[in-house]
Amino acid sequence: MRLPGTLRDVPQPLYLFDGYCVLCSGFVNFCLEHDGDGELKFASTQSALGRRIVAGLGLPADALDWTVMLIEDGQVTLRSTAALGALRHLRGWPRLLVPFRWLPALLRDPVYDLVARNRFRWFGQRDSCHVP
């Protein structure tokens, strides 16, 4: 989906994640460790920027409870496409996972959805929002 003009001022590439999710926060920390150029920006869905983006896209307020989002080059991607898109900005071995982006989302997203549905049970939940 295209980013509406009202959101053109958001920093890009921007990865939005659930700041209470241990798995999501761990992925952000992983990205920070491997993003040698500091290219990726991060915002939790609970932040003012995260809420503004969700509203600006016309998504339900709880939309980012079930997905992550990557905003890059005026495009918005969700779910597994967003997570794999974030890996493109990293250095080292994580880039080896980027070709999985070429698998159809029909194959990738059910796996993403299974993990997303069970992430709190499997990985836990933070008491406070993670701020990278």
Image (cartoon, grey):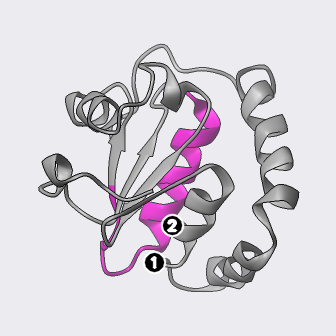
- The picture places residue 119, in percent across and down from the top left corner, at 73, 29
Residue 131 sits above or below residue 92 on the image: above
Residue 102 sits above or below residue 52 on the image: below
Q: Which kind of residue does numbered mark 1 sit on? A: His
Left or right of 78, for residue 16: left
Residue 60: in magenta span: no
- Considering depth in this image, is 90 or 116 the residue closer to the camera? 116
- The picture places residue 75, in percent across and down from the top left corner, at 39, 64
Q: Label 2 near label 1: C-beta < 8 Å?
A: yes
- Considering depth in this image, is 94 or 7 the residue closer to the camera? 7
What residue lies at 57% left-to-right and 29% top-to-bottom?
21
Residue that numbered label 1 is attached to = 89
Quadrant hosting residue 49: top left
- Which contiguous range is marked in magenta? 21-41
Give how far apart the Cα atoms at labels 1 and 2 are: 6 Å
- The picture places residue 44, in percent across and down from the top left corner, at 37, 36
Q: Which kind of residue does numbered mark 2 sit on? A: Ala
Quadrant hosting residue 89: bottom left
- Magenta span main SS: helix
Q: Which mark is residue 86?
A: 2
The local crowd at label 1, few if under 14, some if 14 to 19, many if 20 or more residues have their Cα within 10 Å, is some
Q: Label 1's element?
A: loop
The local crowd at label 2, few if under 14, some if 14 to 19, many if 20 or more residues have their Cα within 10 Å, is many
- Considering depth in this image, is 73 or 114 the residue closer to the camera? 73
Left or right of 78, for residue 17: left
